[in-house]
Image (cartoon, rainbow, N blue to C red):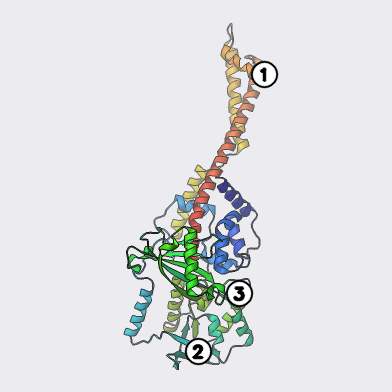
Amino acid sequence: MLEGLRIAFSYLRWRIFPYRPEETFEQWVTNRFGRRLFLTFFKAYTEKVWGIPCSELKAEWAAQRIKDLSLKTALLSMVFKPRKTIKTLIEEFDYPRLGPGMMWNAVKHAIELRNGTVMVDSDVVRIERSGNRLGRVIVAHGGSEQSIAAEHFLSSMPITEFVLRLDPPPPPQVAAAAKRLTYRDFLTVCLIVNQADLFPDNWIYIQDPEVQVGRIQNFKNWSPDMVPEPSQSSLGLEYFCTEGDRLWSMPDAELIELAKRELELIGLARAGDIADGCVFRVEKAYPVYDSDYQEYLEVVKDFVAGLENFQTVGRNGLHRYNNQDHAMLTGMLAVRNVLEGEHNDLWSVNADQEYLEEMEIPQATAEAAAAAVESAIGEALLRLDRTAFGLSLGAVAGIALFAATLALVLKGGPVVGPNLQLLGYFLPGYRVTLGGSLIGLVYGFLIGFLCGWSFAFLRNASVFLYVATVQRRVERRMLRRLFEYV
């Protein structure tokens, strides 16, 4: 409860006094979640992934990967569920029985059925151009070079490597800008564990700075067929690094031992239960959004835009941290540009800071739903004005006591209002008399005001605590979604 209050007050503080301007990942997240949540959930993990401080990572990455949240929208989404809900690939999707590689094997097979050629284990050595047109690509394969000429060229290779393999080379400022664009690499240590069921999640994110592992995948939970032995599990421990650094250069045997130690330290499995392990390294997995990347990318984009028969696609081709579906969409749009004569801007895919896998609610339905929910929440969580409520209750109580006293005085009798006379013990000066009715009016007003003010204060405080608790629960859910996209 105390932590929830800290998070709530931190959230309110940064909503009232946010960072201006908002340029870095740290500022972006803090403005939307508060500094307490930033330090608790974002900082350590994000710096593991990128290898740079959050204060140097650009806000564009957060805006691209995290839906813009607020307490209002979070509460609306929890209370009301429209007929056409927003579907995201995170919540529900089909997973290939033997992993995503099945899809690309099917694509390769389909190309070959149409007499196309897919060359694997090949390197692009040189890309020949004449002015603003590409002419051929020189590919190294099987110990020899092969020249491939074409009318149109699509490339998903890192834009930095494309620029540096051009012949003749691009202008010096373009080559220099390409060299300044950087990437983050990672490696996966795959461990076979002699346990049938380790944990129920597909993956978990490790925020603890005491270990180097950043994410752990449980492949058996993706598909049972990915682990042929039912009594075993297969875990992929992902380590974020940079090609050539200490972690990247460690021998496989040392990486496996490191993964064993950290898995046991986390408490997911004992080192003695590990039956086998292997290491897979992935180069240029994440384009880095550092403080200067946009300036250099613009130089490269301007140059590439001048190439008449070339389009760059995909995460690395556009130096944009897209999901796989975004990357595939850029490829499809590029083909339509060639075959259908369309003019799709590939650089704008996923640049609107919204996820393309979302299916939007029709505008009229969304507006009606928002209005209905806002009205319901407004009625349920309306803030009571303490002064107004106190004045109202004070007026009612004062008039009631005045009227009751005056009625007894007018009624008369040998003993006037014996029961009401007892109030005199608690309200000095009060009597069941004509003058006492006026004193009762004052006392009734003061007591009613204090009771009304106190009730409104306690009611508002309880609503605030409830909202803070709900907010914390919602933010944890959305944080989990964030980590699933990282």
Q: How many marks?
A: 3
Residue with the most extreme front position: 272
Q: Looking at the image, can residue 165 be seen?
A: yes
Q: Secondary structure at mark 1?
A: loop
Q: CA distance from mark 1 to mark 2?
A: 100 Å
Mark 1 neighbour density, 10 Å: few (under 14) some (14–19) many (20 or more): few
Q: Secondary structure at mark 3?
A: helix
Q: In this figure, which residue is indicated by the disc labeled 2?
A: 125
Q: Secondary structure at mark 2?
A: strand
Quadrant occupied by the N terminus: top right
Amino acid identity at mark 2: Val
Q: In this figure, which residue is indicated by the disc labeled 1?
A: 428
Of labels 3 and 1, the one closer to you: 3
Residue at point 58%, 90% (across, down): 169
| Residue 109 x %, y % | 33, 81
Q: Looking at the image, can residue 322 be seen?
A: no
Mark 2 neighbour density, 10 Å: few (under 14) some (14–19) many (20 or more): some
Residue at point 61%, 17% (across, down): 423
Front residue of 432/47: it is: 47
Q: CA distance from mark 3 to mark 2?
A: 26 Å
Q: Please, is residue 440 above or below residue 75 in the view?
A: above
Residue at point 53%, 81% (across, down): 159
| Residue 320 x %, y % | 53, 73
Of labels 3 and 2, the one closer to you: 2
Mark 3 neighbour density, 10 Å: few (under 14) some (14–19) many (20 or more): some
Numbered label attached to residue 286: none
| Residue 332 x %, y % | 42, 77
Position of 448 with respect to 66 (left or right) is right
- Give the quadrant of residue 226: bottom left
Amino acid identity at mark 3: Tyr
Q: In this figure, which residue is indicated by the disc labeled 3?
A: 293
Q: Please, is residue 212 above or below residue 451 in the view?
A: below
